[in-house]
Image: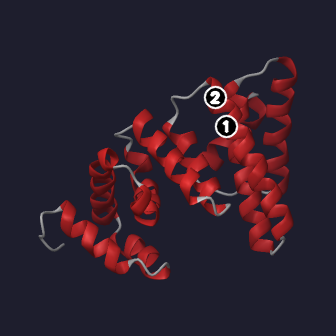
Amino acid sequence: MTVGNPGLDKLRRGEMLTEAGLERVRRSRETALAWLDLPRARIDLGYLHLRRALLANERGDLPEARAELEEAVAAFVRGLSREPVDPYAWHELAYAHLYAARPERAVVALAMSYRTGRYVPPLAPSRARLALVLWEGLAEDLRPWALRELTIAHRRDRETLETFARTLGLERRLRELLGLATGGYAF
């Protein structure tokens, strides 16, 4: 599995790899799975397929993007069924479901990301964006955590979060949630 580790580290940080790099990750994980059904290798394949789906979407190849999304979901679900305490993998599964137009499943995966790792600073900006999009479906007990991460994300990189909200027409929701999180004090 170590052959694909540098590439996988890049994928986990949200960086993109060349096709050769993606193929190296795939081969290393599938080789490992041929020896032993490792949940981590399944999860790693989920990351790989999700990035491939994004690349296919950028190229305009929607059938391939859809197929890669389904592969990503299947890999994450299979790996998480045996190794469920992984807030990063649940987070990525939430994105895969959201991209596949299954917001109700994305909410469940985001909830599991929070429940398996409530305080994970590297995930805060990305989970904040997910929470902003999925707010209506988010369970009441998780909303304080989502508000906290929205506040963190806004403080870290206000422009990025506001641009994201503007692009999706969620500016009003963002302002309301930040006001709720800060007791009405403006940023």
Q: Residues within 10 Å of mark 2 (few under 14, many from 20)?
A: few
- Residue type pointed to by label 1: Val
Q: Is residue 72 left or right of residue 170?
A: right
Residue 108 vertical position relative to residue 65 in the rendered view, above or below: above
What residue is drawn where x is 33% and y is 74%? 173
What separation in Å lies between label 2 and label 1 (alpha carbons)?
6 Å
- Which quarter of the image is occupied by the N terminus? top right
The numbered mark at residue 123 is none
Proximity of marks 2 and 1: CB atoms separated by less than 8 Å: yes
Task: Please give the name of the residue rendered at 78% of the width and 41% of the height, measured from the top-left corner.
Answer: 25
Which element is circle 1 on?
helix
Residue appearing at x 86%, y 37% in the figure? 27
| Amino acid type of the residue tagged 2 in the rendering | Ser
Q: Which residue is mark 2?
A: 81
Which quarter of the rendered picture does the C terminus lie within? bottom left
- Circle 1: is it few (<14), some (14-19), or many (20+) Cα within 10 Å? many
Residue at the (63%, 42%) spot, across then down: 9
Against 171, is 3 above or below? above
The residue wearing badge 1 is: 77
Q: Nearer the viewer, residue 59 or 85?
A: 85
Judged left or right of residue 136, residue 52 is: right
Query: Of helix, strand and loop, which one carries label 2?
Result: helix
Residue 153 pos. (x, y %) = 34, 60
Spot occupied by residue 87 in the image (x, y as percentages of width and height): 49, 38
Nearest the eye: 185 or 121? 185
Can residue 136 be seen here? The reply is yes
Number of residue marks: 2
